[in-house]
Amino acid sequence: MRQGANRIVAAPAQIVIDRVSHTYRPARGRPVLALDNVSLEVRDREFVALLGPSGCGKSTLLYLIGGFLPVEAGAIRVDDRPIAGPGPDRGIVFQHFALFPWKTVRQNILYGLEKQGMASEERQRRAREFIDLVGLTGFEDSYPAQLSGGMKQRAAIARTLAIDPHILLMDEPFGALDAQTRNLMQVELLRIWQRSRKTVIFVTHDVQEAVLLAERIAVMSARPGHIKEIVEARFDKEDPGLTRSQPFVEMVDHVWNLVRGEAILAQRSGAG
Amino acid sequence: MALDQSQATAPGTLGRPPVRVPEFFAPARLLAGLWRYLPLVLLALAWEAATRLGVISPAELPALDKVGSAWWGLLAGGDLGDNTFISLSRAVAGLAAAIALGVPLGVMMAWSKPVRTVFNPIVQAFYPMPKSALIPVVVLWLGFGSASKILMIFIGCMLPITLSAFNGARGTDQVLIWSARSLGASRLATLTQVVLPGALPEILAGIRTAIAFAFVLLVSTELIVARHGLGYMIGWLGDGGVYDAMFAVVLTVAALGFLADRSFLLLMKRVLRWRE
Ligand SMILES: Nc1ncnc2c1ncn2[C@@H]1O[C@H](COP(=O)(O)OP(=O)(O)OP(=O)(O)O)[C@@H](O)[C@H]1O
Ligand SMILES: [Mg+2]
């Protein structure tokens, strides 16, 4: 189960997920076992993608690392300390954006910067910088309700990136983007990751995206989710011809097969 | 290009006008407003016709033009202005107190289990109770002056406001609170910076209901026991058989209620413009 264990010697793990299970207990209805004995170690400055069928517990795992849900079975340690609630050291981009609807794009981004205690001028400068980065210049003063899904997603990404968290938890952050914007954002994310060397856990449904961005890909099983296999995907990300190269294409194919099996399982169990 | 220009001069047709025209001066809007209240104009005409044609005797329903001149008389004499001022100050004081206490209580009920456990049964039990039943008791406590009116309005308005704040705060999207926390907000900060603004649409809707309640309770309390105020005027003029003047005051109360509601609605639209 503990695929990452033999790696500890090489580099210290920053995030250690140790035999974590999670059960949702809704007020009505029966409890749902969302995660079953999940173990994963993520090294400092590593980029890990999380892949798995819908409903397998990817978001749940991010919520646990983020400190939003209590770890009830197993343990999660970040920088060798158990998690004590949410904090700006672990920035998160939520699957459904979670922008404050009563704040404009700019105000949303400024909010996090204010909480970091940044001086006013610096805040404004930084907000502009990240609005520009995600291509929302001209929409600074729009409210989320006035934006398209992809624009909201980019605003949420900007808000999280702006506070410069050391750990970046991203829940299908590019899911609502069109292919072109998605491509630009992928390149941008890689650049930020390489420049500021963040630890990234990146949830996606897109196998090619996972292979392109991540150094390791954790494939999860159908619900109740556990880590089925961890695949190394170390490619030269600077290489412009990468996505057409033979090893890359083979890797995508390999991961596809892993995911497909689980997706079929998930479909069957989802019905019953 | 031509399309853009036509939109600029005809606000309220398609999309939003690029230039903000003062709302009351925009002819299209004014016309639309008149059209909307046409049934009201027809009702007034029917009233006038019914009394003129003798369908209804003037003892039961005075003619509208009589009411109009009585209204003018009351206004010129200063009675109407003074009593309107007294009544409105009572309404504002009672409402303000209800908002100041009701909103924090409702939000705290949603936020904290112990607070909810204590107050929820109380709020639920008193909510459907007809508040006017309390008028004699409140008068007994506080006497004939403004204090009893303000307390009645406070009692009547507090519960709908509390409940709306409670429901609004309970409906806060969990992920928004998580968002704020992961951006570095303290638990307390999320209460005022996420839960409260998130509950604002419901809170404002609750206050709007409360404004209507405030008018009902104001007039009924003043009718029963008072020495000033519009309700008192209605009772006093009615007892004296001066029906045209009495109707003038009744219509004044109706108009004030309508105006209060409309202005509040405008304020709501402004405050909640992020919702479009
Ligand atoms: N609040 C909740 N109450 C009850 N069950 C829940 C709750 N949230 C999630 N679940 C269940 O837990 C399981 C895992 O949910 P989760 O959102 O983590 O999946 P996911 O892998 O992120 O799926 P997707 O790819 O569709 O986003 C699902 O089967 C879901 O039904
Ligand atoms: Mg999810």
Image (spheres, coloured by chain):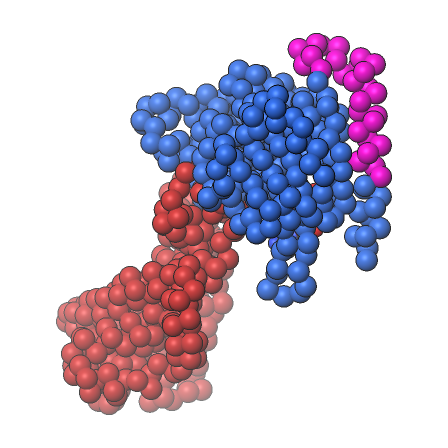
Q: Residue at x 46, y 72 (%)?
A: B43
Asked whether A40 or B81 is in front, the reply is A40
From the top left corner, tell me how far across and down residue B231 is, in percent: 26, 79
Q: Is residue A167 above or below residue B170?
A: above
Prevailing secondary structure class for the magenta stretch in the rendered image: helix
Q: Is residue A117 above or below residue B93?
A: above
- Output the letter for the chain in red: B
Q: Residue at x 66, y 31 (%)?
A: A5
Tell whether position A250 is magenta. Answer: yes
Snapshot quadrant of residue A271: bottom right
Tell whether position A169 is magenta. Answer: no
Q: Is residue B97 above or below residue A46?
A: below
Position of the C terminus of chain A, as image quadrant, is bottom right
Asked whether B60 or A157 is in front, the reply is A157
Q: Is residue A29 left or right of residue B48?
A: right
From the top left corner, tell me how far across and down residue A47 is, in percent: 62, 25
Q: Residue at x 39, y 51 (%)?
A: B191
Q: Is residue A214 left or right of residue A64?
A: right
Which stretch is magenta?
Answer: A235-261
Asked whether B203 or A154 is in front, the reply is A154
- Output the letter for the chain in blue: A
Q: Residue at x 35, y 81 (%)?
A: B131
